[in-house]
Amino acid sequence: MWIGGVTLVNNSQDCFNDKNLMGEYLVGKDTIVLCDDNIEQSRQSMGRVLRHEYIHYIYDRDQRQTPILGENNLNKFVREMDSSEVMFVLISEDEDSVNEEFEARILSDLPSVLLFFLDAFLMIFH
């Protein structure tokens, strides 16, 4: 399946090897892998996982170095996140991708239609 410039793939070997993996964006390949079985087992939302990985795609496509929300707004949202989730991101991500991961987690809660408009806006004004 193809959506917004990205190929969607269901399940990969990584999904079977890591039951905690819900999805991944394959940098440079414009491909999002959704780990259907893992998502179902964890009772996560397929739409939320897709939106999360799509944010990573936007970062890669636009070669973003700064948060979409802006540094100050991102900091405000991160302060509202659960402290265990913040700590997980801080210890599991390298320094260059921490803001991207925080933003993917925050923006994945947006309704899909708002993410579509945000993406269109970013493509126009990039």
Image (cartoon, helix red, strand yellow):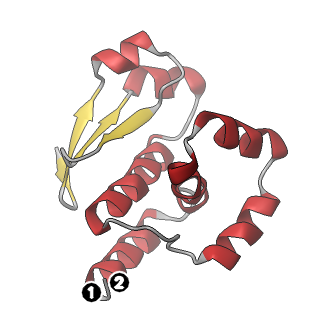
Q: Which amino acid does label 1 sit on?
A: Ile
| Residue at far front of view | 95
Q: Mark 2 points at which residue?
A: 121
Q: Residue 3 or 102: which is nearer the viewer?
A: 102
State which quadrant residue 13 falls in.
top left
Q: Is residue 36 left or right of residue 42?
A: left
**Cβ atoms under marks 2 and 1 closer than 8 Å:** yes
Residue 109 % position (x, y):
58, 58
Residue 22 % position (x, y):
47, 31
Q: In this view, does 82 lie to the left or right of 114?
A: right
Q: Residue at x 32, y 88 (%)?
A: 125
**CA distance for labels 2 and 1:** 5 Å
Q: Residues within 10 Å of mark 1 (few under 14, many from 20)?
A: few
Residue 36 % position (x, y):
39, 27
The image quadrant where one finds the N terminus is top left
Up-down: is 30 above or below 18? Answer: below
Residue 113 % position (x, y):
41, 70
Q: Name the residue under label 1.
A: 124
Up-down: is 92 above or below 40? Answer: below
Q: Residue 7 or 43: which is nearer the viewer?
A: 7
Label 1: which secondary element: helix
Label 2: which secondary element: helix
Q: Residue at x 22, y 61 (%)?
A: 4
| Residue at far bottom of view | 125
Up-down: is 49 above or below 5? Answer: above
Q: How crowded is mark 2: few (under 14 residues within 10 Å), some or many (20 or more)?
A: few
Q: Residue 24 carries which label?
A: none
State which quadrant residue 74 falls in.
bottom right
Q: Which amino acid does label 2 sit on?
A: Phe
